[in-house]
Image (cartoon, rainbow, N blue to C red):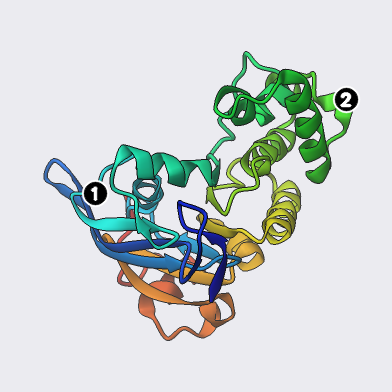
Amino acid sequence: DLCEGGDMSGNPISGPILELKNAHKAFGSKQVLRGVDLTVARGQSLVIIGGSGTGKSVTIKSALGLLPLDKGEVRFAGEAANDRKSIEALRRRTGMLFQGGALFDSLTVWENVAFALIYRDGVSRGKAKKLAIENLAKVRLPASAADLRPAELSGGMQKRVALARAIIAKPDLIFFDEPTTGLDPITADAVNNLIVEQVKALGAAAVSITHDMASVRKIADEVAMLHEGKIVWRGPVSALDNSGNPFIDQFVNGRAEGPIQPAI
């Protein structure tokens, strides 16, 4: 696939927007990642599934440079992200929707949405507020919400604000960490619809982690299963129910019996 964006210098490139190659990460004696290989193309939505403690969040944090790998490498738009400058370049072109939203209680909604524009990019507050309101509209929130505080919003509205913040800088890659946690099924479906809509509108790549199979089926083009620090299956979302893989079969059907041991 031709990546429509460019490398970290802005030059057009061919190939994936994000690559993890032989990624290893341990915390003390606990080996979390044991050779993860992942590639994500521009415009592709990849969802990583797996039981609790299998390394899903560590994979995302490693891809963002928040956790340095013990072995292996992260490549963004064809270039290694292995020092402060290259990691910062990656982050400038990346959006993130954190589990729980992670909004700043002390800031208004619009200040949350425009946080990176103001504090990283030096955009004036007037222009930043205008852009924030435009992006709130994209997630079906009215301009009247802009001056509210996050505590005045429902959980679903807070997720929408977090999504507006993730897309405002028009990133090439967006990470979604359990985007529907804590939401009722109807609100979760509405958030999933917005995620699909906005990722497609940007033409961005998306990498999500979730336990919610309804979210997986709604937002994924491809699914990767992480187990004991390795990818044990990857395929199109349409193959989930007929994968022939015992790990996928157990996880999708929510059975206690199988190769995955319950985390209790």
In-image side of 215 versus 129 (left or right): left
In-image side of 169 versus 242 (left or right): right
Q: Position of residue 179 (x, y in %)?
A: 59, 47
The residue located at (42%, 86%) in the rendering is 244
Residue flagged by tag 2: what amino acid is it? Ser
Observer able to see residue 191? yes
Q: Which picture quadrant has residue 150?
A: top right
In-image side of 195 versus 254 (left or right): right
Circle 2 — which element?
helix
Q: Position of residue 92 (x, y in %)?
A: 51, 41
The residue located at (44%, 43%) in the rendering is 89
What residue did someone put label 2 on?
144
The residue located at (66%, 44%) in the rendering is 167
Residue nearest the observer in this picture, 111 or 210: 111
Local packing at callout 1 (Cα closer than 10 Å; few below 14, some 14-19, many 20+) is many
Lower sequence index among marks 2 and 1:
1
User: What mark, if any, has residue 69 been given in the picture?
Assistant: 1
The residue located at (53%, 39%) in the rendering is 98
Residue flagged by tag 1: what amino acid is it? Leu
Disc 2 versus disc 1: distance between alpha carbons?
A: 44 Å
